[in-house]
Image: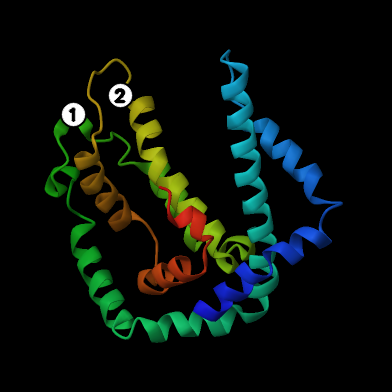
């Protein structure tokens, strides 16, 4: 796994040289979409624009290399993930057994305050999380896409709460988030969590791993 990541990182500059014709078109569109709205100092906007462009370019390069290196080795890399998690299968089996017991428990069982509980049972977030196990080739083969979906699902906790709790003053804090997300994972259809963790941790873009 570490060797695969080393190869991807080493090839970044080569990929940039060979993609000079295609990358700027994608970069301009992505950077333009990331531009903040509203007024501000010209200097600050310029600095933000350069940083956004650099980050976007880095992600584009890594995504292309990730696809080129990981796709052909997908089965072997997943086998490595299983080997690295020596107790992974046991852990996953224990989790599934416990999840079956906990699925019938209400949100209060997880320590979610009444004012923060979702009337829909966080259905929108669960649906986003289930996309990780959708079987879609674009998602299942590429770790950075899996990581992006995970972050999107986690972030949607706040938007889902805001849409369901209109008119209430309650706010989800960092401490509140954990029991909510545990409830969501239990109610989801995610499988092979040990394998998924190793796959994302060792092969996703390291820059993304330092963020949310």
Question: Mark 2: which secondary structure?
Answer: loop
In the image, is 182 to the left or to the right of 64?
left
Q: Which mark is residue 29?
A: none
In the image, is 194 to the left or to the right of 2?
left
Furthest residue in direction right, as rendered: 21
Furthest residue in direction top, as rendered: 39
In the image, is 67 to the left or to the right of 121?
right
The reply to whether discs 1 and 2 touch (Cβ–Cβ < 8 Å) is: yes
Task: Identify which residue, 162 or 57, lies in the foreground.
Answer: 57
Question: Mark 1: which secondary structure?
Answer: helix
Q: Residue at x 41, y 82 (%)?
A: 82
Q: Residue at x 50, y 55 (%)?
A: 207
Comes first in the chain, label 1 or label 2: 1
List x then y, in percent, for residue 7: 62, 75
List x then y, in percent, for residue 149: 50, 52
Q: Residue at x 38, y 83 (%)?
A: 84
- Bin the neighbour count of mark 2 within 10 Å (Cα to Cα): few under 14, some 14-19, many 20 and up: some
- Residue 19 seen by the camera: yes
List x then y, in percent, for residue 187: 31, 54
Q: Which residue is mark 1?
A: 115
- The Cα atoms of the two marked residues, 1 and 2, are separated by 9 Å
Q: Which residue is mark 2?
A: 165
């Amino acid at each position: 796994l570490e060797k695969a990541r080393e190869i991807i990182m080493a090839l970044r500059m080569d990929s940039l040289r060979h993609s000079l014709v295609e990358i700027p078109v994608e970069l301009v569109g992505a950077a333009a979409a990331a531009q903040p709205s509203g007024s501000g100092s010209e200097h600050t906007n310029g600095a933000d624009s350069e940083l956004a462009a650099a980050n976007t370019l880095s992600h584009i390069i890594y995504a292309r290399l990730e696809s080129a290196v990981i796709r052909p080795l997908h089965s072997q890399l997943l086998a490595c993930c299983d080997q690295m998690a020596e107790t992974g299968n046991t852990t996953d089996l224990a989790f599934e057994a416990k999840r079956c017991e906990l699925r019938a428990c209400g949100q209060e069982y997880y320590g979610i305050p009444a004012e923060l509980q979702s009337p829909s049972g966080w259905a929108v977030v669960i649906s986003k999380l289930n996309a990780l196990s959708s079987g879609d080739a674009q998602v299942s083969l590429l770790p950075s896409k899996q990581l992006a979906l995970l972050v999107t699902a986690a972030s949607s906790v706040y938007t889902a709460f805001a849409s369901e709790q209109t008119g209430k003053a309650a706010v989800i804090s960092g401490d509140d988030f954990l029991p909510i997300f545990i409830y969501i994972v239990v109610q989801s259809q995610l499988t092979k969590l040990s394998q998924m963790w190793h796959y994302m941790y060792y092969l996703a873009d390291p820059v993304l791993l330092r963020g949310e």
